[in-house]
Image (tube, rainbow, N blue to C red):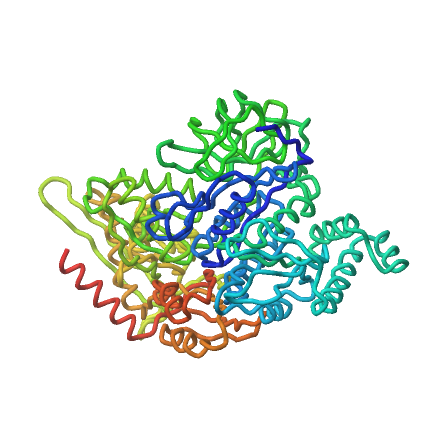
């Protein structure tokens, strides 16, 4: 294929909710451009974009797929993104390396929660948006209702380029108000018949054309003046006005298609080729040092690797965008992210698993290479003339967590290698080896997301694994002051062990004054602070230790050993074995032996004195609580509210947002374990939620009793 220059390249993300028909639309696009000779179907498992075994197994897209089309003398690079909210990371990645988003809307269901989530992402990234109303031939398709819904949610920037003469099974024609023509198709779709607009449609078409012309003129002062003077614009002027409006996000054009019947697809492709912004029309991305990196084919050579995957029969494939310069096969580049050198021996443009070898790729283009030595998703590759680094993709926090272990324990190391590799392929799979919980945790965007990971590990890597409920990272603390002393004495011939520690503990809060006097019963204890250690804890909170020893009762050289004993119990709290936090300790007395005292003696004495005092200080268990926002359709809000309240949620507020209800709540992490699955079941998959850590709060008394009982039983079993 020819080498396309930067002014001939456009990059487009294909987005939309699950079931909107993106993969089918991609298939029709490839067919219309002559890339494929026959259209596949999702049901048959023979589409260009869904070629991984797991996608054929589940019947829906799991990975983003890159494909291109040569059309009208231009190269259109597309990234077809999964629609399920669980795989939102792919859409976020795609929007960061493309310049326009085509959001596919199912005309039978209208604007779904997933549609809004994707639109919000395009808004945050300031990307142009085009809407494609698909499945207009569906039984429940209602074009006018969907347009009203879109205007209510997205505002008056919604501008119709086309409208169908009829929807449902009879859909076979539409009016194009940009070209002011009627498009009609036979039963097989494909090449349309273009004719004049019928008289009965002329009034509506003229009104929509006027709205479109005004929207185009608003984006350019010269066009606006001409519109006021003449009341019309030429087709080329309208294209230019719409292009500027797309870049400014002041216009969201709407197209009509039936991807399954290949109706309207070629006309939309013409618009993409003629009107949507080129790579160089969009604001330049920035390197981490703030430098704008313009897509200049003559500039320094710099690549950003936005995706890596292990693909059937090939191995590791690295997908990249040429940020600057011209890349030629055989180039030697520096991987500045991993500090090594890489040679790109072969370059490809890709259509799914179809790879076409090319000699060079210019700035703005998207390509792939294979068998790199050590390249990961998110890496930057440069030539010697620049040191740019890119770090502009931000992924959402995980919403679903499971503990994972191999069925055969000896495979633990192999499993970690696999999980690490899979995280490098998809950064929204987050792997954590929790020292606190003594579990390997795998985190993702939902149950389907992790189920996909499990399928791949078991089927691709042939390693059986088990998912389990993750333990909850509880915390322990105290609510009042308490005193305790402990003598550790051990004699077994020769030198023995002896250490005695007296201490007082109390809850710690920032800014509290130094200890002075404590009273327990009728006895008063005066503190004379000689030294203070303030220890920030990696899991949150602090341990503050005061050395109040007078008269040399304990030698100063044993204080560090006592503090180690205190930390032993802070790391494994006396109640449930969880981390303890926010405690201050006054070591005020003790005894030592001139021969038998040593560090281990005082470490054990400090540990046991602390445990006894902790139990007498009205200890409490804290649990992690999250702020949760749930977007739900109004007709199921009551059911969602009831479910949240059953999860010990505190409802913080409710608001209406773009046709959906937003419920804000504070929910214990324990109750969120399988929430994504439950929410999907309650709402039929029409809802979504986000969660972010808020803080730790006291667990209810009945919950604490259960936790203490369970911990005691587990220790008995051990």
- Note whether residue 158 is visible: yes
**Residue 353 is drawn in which quadrant?**
top left
Tell me which residue sits at (45%, 76%) in the image.
636
- Note whether residue 534 is visible: no
Indicate whether 614 appears above or below 601.
below
Image spot of residue 373 (x, y percent) = 42, 26
Indicate whether 431 appears above or below 339.
below
- Nearest the eye: 409 or 193: 193
Indicate whether 294 appears above or below 27.
above
Q: If the image is split into quadrants, where does the N terminus sit?
A: top right
Image spot of residue 703 (x, y percent) = 29, 72
- Nearest the eye: 502 or 269: 269
Image spot of residue 303 (x, y percent) = 57, 32
Image spot of residue 337 (x, y percent) = 51, 32
Say left or right for 681 vs 656. Answer: left
Tell me which residue sits at (39%, 43%) in the image.
51
Say left or right for 258 vs 578. Answer: right
- Nearest the eye: 619 or 608: 619
């Amino acid at each position: 294929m020819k080498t396309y220059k930067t002014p001939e390249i456009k990059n487009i993300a294909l987005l939309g909710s699950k079931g909107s028909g993106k993969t089918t639309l991609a298939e029709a696009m490839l067919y219309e451009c002559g890339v494929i000779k026959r259209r596949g179907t999702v049901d048959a498992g023979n589409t260009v974009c869904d070629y991984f075994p797991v996608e054929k197994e589940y019947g829906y897209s799991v990975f983003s797929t890159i494909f291109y089309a040569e059309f009208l003398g231009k190269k259109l690079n597309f990234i077809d993104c999964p629609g399920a909210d669980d795989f939102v990371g792919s859409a976020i990645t795609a929007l960061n390396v493309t310049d326009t988003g085509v959001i596919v809307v199912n005309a039978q269901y209208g604007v779904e929660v997933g549609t809004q989530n994707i639109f919000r992402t395009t808004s945050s990234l300031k990307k142009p948006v085009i809407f494609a109303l698909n499945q207009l031939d569906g039984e429940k398709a209602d074009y006018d209702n969907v347009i009203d819904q879109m205007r209510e949610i997205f505002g008056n920037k919604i501008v119709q380029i086309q409208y169908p003469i009829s929807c449902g099974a009879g859909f076979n024609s539409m009016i194009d108000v940009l070209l002011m023509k009627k498009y009609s198709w036979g039963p097989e779709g494909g090449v349309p018949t273009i004719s004049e607009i019928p008289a009965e449609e002329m009034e509506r078409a003229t009104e929509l054309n006027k709205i479109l012309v005004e929207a185009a003129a608003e984006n350019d002062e010269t066009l606006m003046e001409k519109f006021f003077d003449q009341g019309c614009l030429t087709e080329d002027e309208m294209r230019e006005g719409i292009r500027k409006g797309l870049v400014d996000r002041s216009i969201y054009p709407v197209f009509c298609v039936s991807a399954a019947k290949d109706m309207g697809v070629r006309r939309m492709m013409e618009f993409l080729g003629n009107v949507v912004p080129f790579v160089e029309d969009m604001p330049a991305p920035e390197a981490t040092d703030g430098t704008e990196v313009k897509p200049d084919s003559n500039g320094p050579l710099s690549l950003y690797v936005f995706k890596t995957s292990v693909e059937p029969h090939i191995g590791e494939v690295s997908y990249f965008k040429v940020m600057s310069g011209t890349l030629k096969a055989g180039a030697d580049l520096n991987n500045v992210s991993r500090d090594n050198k890489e040679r790109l021996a072969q370059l490809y443009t890709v259509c799914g698993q179809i790879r076409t070898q090319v000699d060079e790729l210019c700035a703005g283009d998207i390509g792939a290479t294979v068998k790199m030595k050590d390249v990961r998703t998110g890496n930057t590759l440069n030539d010697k003339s620049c040191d740019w680094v890119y770090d502009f993709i931000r992924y959402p926090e995980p919403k679903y967590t499971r503990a994972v272990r191999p069925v055969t324990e000896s495979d633990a190391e192999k499993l970690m290698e696999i999980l690490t590799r899979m995280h490098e392929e998809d950064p929204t799979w987050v792997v954590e080896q929790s020292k606190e919980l003594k579990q390997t945790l795998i985190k993702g965007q939902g149950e389907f997301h992790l189920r996909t990971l499990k399928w791949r590990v078991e089927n691709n890597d042939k390693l059986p694994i088990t998912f389990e409920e993750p333990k909850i990272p509880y915390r322990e603390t105290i609510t009042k002051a308490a005193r305790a002393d402990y003598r550790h004495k051990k004699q077994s011939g020769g030198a023995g062990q002896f250490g005695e520690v007296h201490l007082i503990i109390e809850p710690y809060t920032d800014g509290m004054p130094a200890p002075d006097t404590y009273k327990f019963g009728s006895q008063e204890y005066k503190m004379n602070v000689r030294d203070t250690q303030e220890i920030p804890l990696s899991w949150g909170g602090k341990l503050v230790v005061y050395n109040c020893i007078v008269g040399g009762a304990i030698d100063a050289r044993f204080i560090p050993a006592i503090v180690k004993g205190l930390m032993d119990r802070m790391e494994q709290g006396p109640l449930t074995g969880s981390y303890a936090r926010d405690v201050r300790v006054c070591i005020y007395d003790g005894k030592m032996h001139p021969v038998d005292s040593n560090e281990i003696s005082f470490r054990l004495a400090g540990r046991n004195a602390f445990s006894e005092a902790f139990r007498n200080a009205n200890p409490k268990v804290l649990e992690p609580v999250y702020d949760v926002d749930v977007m739900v359709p109004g007709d199921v809000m009551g059911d969602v509210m009831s479910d949240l309240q059953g999860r010990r949620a505190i409802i913080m507020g409710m608001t209406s947002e773009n046709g959906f209800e937003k419920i804000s709540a504070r929910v214990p992490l324990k109750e969120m374990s399988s929430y994504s699955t439950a929410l999907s079941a309650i709402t039929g998959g029409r809802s979504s939620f986000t969660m972010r850590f808020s803080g730790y709060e006291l667990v209810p008394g009945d919950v604490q009793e259960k936790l203490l009982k369970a911990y005691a039983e587990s220790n008995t079993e051990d």
